[in-house]
Image (tube, rainbow, N blue to C red):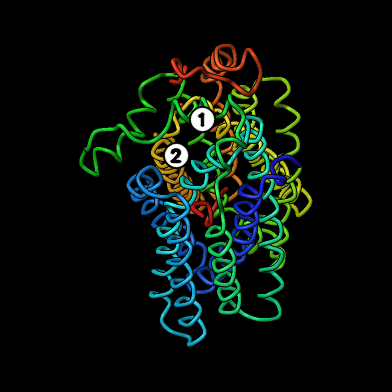
Amino acid sequence: MANVFANPALRRVFLAFAGSLIGDGVFSLSAIVYVFRHGGTTAVGVLVVVRYVAIATIAPLASIFADQYDRRLVMVVSDVVRLVLVLIGALLVGLHASKWPVFVVIVLVGLAGTAFRPSQVAILPGLARNPDEVAGANVVSSTIESVGFFAGPALAGFLLAYANVATAFGFDAVTFVWSALLIVSVRPPRDEERSPELQSLLAASGRGGEPYQPFVVRAVKGFQFIAHDRRVSVLVVLYVLQCVVAGASAVFTVAIALKLLHIGSSGLGLMESLLGIGGLVGGFLALMLMERARLAMDFALGVIVWAAPLLIIAILPNLFAALVSMWLIGAANSVVDVNAITILQHIVPNDKLGRVMGALEGGEVGGMALGSLLMTVLIHLVGLRTGLSVIGVSVSLLVLPGLPTMRRIDAEAFTGGVVVRHSPAHHHPHLHHVRWGHAR
């Protein structure tokens, strides 16, 4: 990963991402606590579903900006819009305004971030100097996400203990300024700084040459690309299954901390922090597993490890079991994210990557909405512990039919190693967080 930070452009992007994610963790936990205080578990579940459905609807449309405009500009505009929204939220909370405008701001912050992540993923190959930096950048990205999931909630717990929600929102606003200033300073490497292999890849998949099409038609290209080959479809379906658990976690984590274990906001912050620590370990695990060139199979197993720990909490409803489960989920999260994005970046033409990522984000956020709704309903119908068991077992079993397809992807796409080097004539596919702040 050292070669990634030796690249000035990638270093600035990831420093911006790090500050942004820490602030996002602060905002996410503070928002959940605010909603819980003003409406309980039901309010958390309903608002999470509304937020996720809205993001899932807008993300595929917003992602087209990543393929149509300067990706740096798209990321900066996203930061500035969210800066304004978060400041409004801080002002409303500080003035003890009605909860409804604050709920609206929480949803809008998520919508304003839908173009950021596809732009960030799609810009990385153009900022790299060789193919190895592309794969390394995905590991760095996942590691930073894990640090953000650890540091953000921990800092939020401190701010909520010694300050208030308005202060936590204000801190998030500062991180948007940090992110925007760093992204503005990013400059892609010159052609002579790039390896011949990477120049060939970028030339073969460069933007331009696509005839004009209406906005909505261009936006759905990502879905069409995913549906074109069964292997891509199965990969996306398994990713969405992981997101079902992620959406459920936005509800069950609050319920476990504040209702089952009664450990308060600081305990909730501790649980979220263990998720980040597990993710940090998982990032290094993903890097080591890449040597096996079994990215698709490891990805599928990571989805199972996301779901299985829910049974631990259901069987042993105590703080230790909850912390171990969050750690395992965090570790699996990094393996799933690193592997999925690395596969996509190497087999999707770069001029379509933004829209594919937007379609994927729409699917994953839709999965989160479904998971949040299911968890809320299950808590009311059968209770928290039974609900955890239902989701954990169901998702694990649904992954199993997809394992043969994952083996096929590994056999066809990674037989020569993780970095697949296409010639210009053959640059086509062989086939292509969680949480409140996911759309960051």
Taking depth in this image into account, of 398 and 286 the one nearest to the observer is: 286
Circle 1 residues within 10 Å: few <14, some 14–19, many ≥20: some
Query: The disc labelled 1 sits on which kind of residue?
Result: Leu
Q: How far from the left and from the top, in percent, is residue 182?
A: 58, 60
Whether residues under marks 2 and 1 lie with C-beta atoms below 8 angstroms apart, the answer is yes
Q: Which residue occupies 65% across, 26% down?
A: 298
Residue type at mark 2 is: Met
Q: Quadrant of residue 81?
A: bottom left
Q: Residue furthest right?
A: 320
Outermost residue on the bottom side: it is 95
Q: Quadrant of residue 105?
A: bottom left
Residue 97 vertical placement versus 39 (above, below): below
Observer-nearest residue: 186 or 342?
Answer: 186
Q: Position of residue 194 (x, y in %)?
A: 60, 34
The image shows residue 276 at horizontal and vertical percentages of 70, 51
In the picture of the structure, the residue carrying the numbered disc 1 is 344
The residue where tag 2 is placed is: 357
Q: Tag 1's secondary structure?
A: helix
